[in-house]
Image (spheres, rainbow, N blue to C red):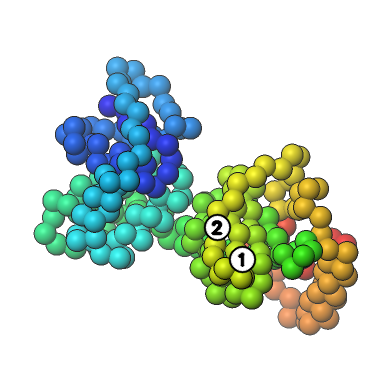
Amino acid sequence: MQLIYDGSFPGLLSTIFTAYEYKLNDALIVRTNQLQSLTLSESMEVYTETAKAERVWKGLKKKIAAQGLELIYRSYLSELPSVENSILEVVRYALQSDQNILEDYGHSHVLTLHQIARKVGREKHRFEAFVRFENIGNNWFYADIAPDFNILPLIAPHFKERYAAQNWMIYDSKRKYGIQYDSVSEQINELTFRFEHAPAGNLSPIVQTDPDEKLYQELWKRYFKSTNIALRKNTKLHLQHVPKRYWRYLTEKKES
């Protein structure tokens, strides 16, 4: 039985509730955009219901506490194929066990979630370090990213704390949504808008930079170059800490 959900986290929890409700021991959870055609397989579309999602979440809180909840949520944000089914199996294992199952690495799905969450965590930390904002005027700063995983919900608290006095937006051009922080209300809001012909990692033609932005970028490049010690250059070590696929986000790596 394929259980089809809308891709949201409450939707996933609602789907897990449905699997229990109908005693579907062989359920296969798939997102709408990852729907598979399986021979001799029935399908059921599951609608997101807040009450059902909250019941599942509250039940998990009693079994795996905050660490386990974070493990499940980060794994979900990976958006990897079939990750929902590993989450379902871990939920089943947790609910039927009287002990903490998080360190049972002998359980294949527990191990899988730890491995996935670790990858998502690395991506989170890298973008917290590598995001570069550009001044787009009116005291607003903008950054465009295209991460492998859906990390915007994870990096939002970091930038809210670090740039609390500024208004900023971070847009995920791969998933076509972003987050916006207003320094007056001190609130982070989700925003959705689409750019036409905007390559990942570059400002859309719709988003115009402040006239002084190019000057600031050039000054930063000069500072970065002046502090570099050529005799201590270690390209291999540098690539380990700053993989080349992140260079497009770094002002100091862009050509003038």
Q: Quadrant of residue 175?
A: top right
Contact, CB < 8 Å: mark 2 with mark 1? Answer: yes
Q: Quadrant of residue 235?
A: bottom right
Q: Classify residue 246 as left or right of residue 231.
A: left
Q: Which residue bears the numbered disc 2?
A: 189
Q: Position of residue 176 (x, y in %)?
A: 61, 44
Residue positioned most to the top? 40
Residue positioned most to the left? 98
Amino acid at dot 2: Asn
Whether residue 90 appears in this view of the structure is: no
Identified at 31% across, 65% down, the residue is 67
Identified at 23% across, 50% down, the residue is 55
Identified at 26% across, 33% down, the residue is 27
Comparing 75 with 193, the one in front is 193
Viewport quadrant of the N terminus:
top left
Q: Gap between marks 2 and 1, in whole Å?
A: 8 Å
Q: Is residue 227 above or below residue 187?
A: below
Q: Position of residue 169 (x, y in %)?
A: 65, 60
Q: Which disc, if any, is residue 144?
A: none
Q: Is residue 139 above or below residue 190?
A: below
